[in-house]
Amino acid sequence: MTDKKPNTLQFERFVFFSDAVFAIAITLLIIDIQLPKKPLLTEQDLQQALVSLAPNYVGFLISFIVIGQFWAGHRRLFRLAKDVGGPTLFANMTLLFAIAFLPFPTAVVNAYGGTTTAVVFYGAWLLFAGLANLWLVHSIHRDEGNLVAPLGDEQRFERRRAVLPLLIATSGIVVGLIYAPAGVVAFTISPPIFAKLLAWRTREQSG
């Protein structure tokens, strides 16, 4: 009984720290949306300034959803674990590293979304984050002694869902290499498409 309390406290600190990193990263996204420094003397000036920020709104929306989905998956994942071992801790810190840096690729694609370099840079970082997340999922799922309960269909679906960021990143990169602005569109529309395909495939296999 005495051994369990420190482990429980450490586990809670670990989860709170992870939540804080997700929260800070998602908040930092808004910093890139700023009005121009020059005075806006008329309503037309203000309207033009707000319209000119449209790429920033899109970048904010994409990365907000991306970070939100990673956080939601992280939350579901750690409902399964009793404690955090070394490999899981390292995998989790790698994911948090990817999430904490994500506002910068977002700022790059906001400013230079019409260029192949910006789109590929964003996609490559999203790919890295997806691989880190997949590593974390496998790290927890394979440690059966640390699981609250045996893995069920829901957890196996979660493992498949962890592949989605890789598909989204790859599609954005491939399309962006052909035509950069279309790559940004691919990052925007591919998440619901791949999610529906995954759900359909899972139902087919269950049936």
Image (cartoon, helix red, strand yellow):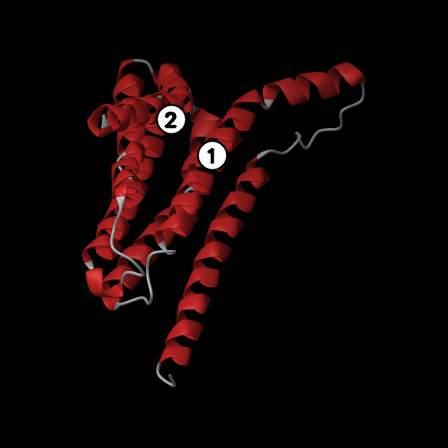
At 37% from the left and 56% from the top, the residue drawn is: 78
Q: Nearer the viewer, residue 178 or 163?
A: 163
The x, y position of residue 190, in whole percent, is 36, 22
At 20% from the left and 27% from the top, the residue drawn is: 205
Task: Report the disc number at residue 191.
Answer: 2
Q: Nearer the viewer, residue 144 or 126?
A: 144
Badge 1 crowding class, 10 Å Cα cut-off, few under 14, some 14 to 19, many 20 or more, is some
Left or right: residue 34 versus residue 18 is: right
Query: How far apart are labels 2 and 1 at the CA level?
Result: 9 Å
Which label's residue is closer to the chain start, 2 or 1?
Answer: 1
For disc 1, the marked residue is 65
Residue type pointed to by label 1: Ile
Disc 1 on helix, strand or loop?
helix
Task: Report the disc number at residue 199.
Answer: none
Disc 2 on helix, strand or loop?
helix
The x, y position of residue 207, in whole percent, is 23, 25
At 40% from the left and 21% from the top, the residue drawn is: 184
The x, y position of residue 30, in whole percent, is 58, 39
Residue positioned most to the bottom: 2
